[in-house]
Amino acid sequence: MFIVDEKTGSKYRYIVLCTQRAQQLLQGAEPRVDSPVKKAAWLAMQEMSQGKIEWKFKSSGENKEEEVEAVENVPAEENS
């Protein structure tokens, strides 16, 4: 079982962010973690657990708390 950090706040948001990041990885984004496993979902979960996924709320109406997006164009940290 995984622990959701305070910034993420909910399991739902964690899954949404990991899904979005996995899609970015499948479309050619560079991974931000070193791992022998190259599956996009696994890499996204590792990035999320290490705090390497930047995200923000989308600004659209009253349900903005449930609408989040992973931000792709944040540079990866060197030697993490």
Image: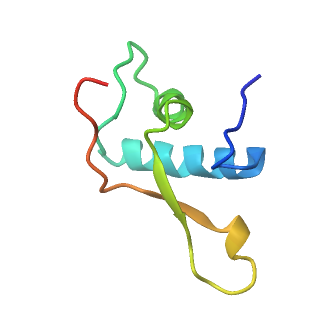
Residue 60 left/right relative to 10: left
Identity of the residue drawn at 27% across and 36% down? 77
Q: Quadrant of the C terminus?
A: top left
Q: Quadrant of the N terminus?
A: top right
Identity of the residue drawn at 22% across and 31% down? 78
Residue 62 left/right relative to 72: right
Identity of the residue drawn at 75% across and 84% down? 62
Taking 77 as reference, is 80 above or below it? above
Q: In this rendered view, identify the residue nearer to me: 64 or 40.
A: 64
Q: In this rendered view, identify the residue nearer to me: 21 or 75.
A: 75
Residue lying at the far bottom in this picture: please name it.
Answer: 61
Taking 18 as reference, is 65 above or below it? below
Residue 67 locus on image (x, y percent) = 65, 68
Residue 11 locus on image (x, y percent) = 76, 44
User: For residue 79, which quarter of the picture?
Assistant: top left
Residue lying at the far top in this picture: please name it.
Answer: 36
Taking 33 as reference, is 29 above or below it? below
Residue lying at the far front in this picture: please name it.
Answer: 6
Taking 23 as reference, is 35 above or below it? above
Identity of the residue drawn at 48% across and 42% down? 22
Residue 13 locus on image (x, y percent) = 69, 52
Residue 21 left/right relative to 61: left
Residue 75 left/right relative to 47: left
Q: How is the image coloured?
A: rainbow
The mark total stands at: 0
User: For residue 32, which quarter of the picture?
Assistant: top left
Residue 21 locus on image (x, y percent) = 48, 47
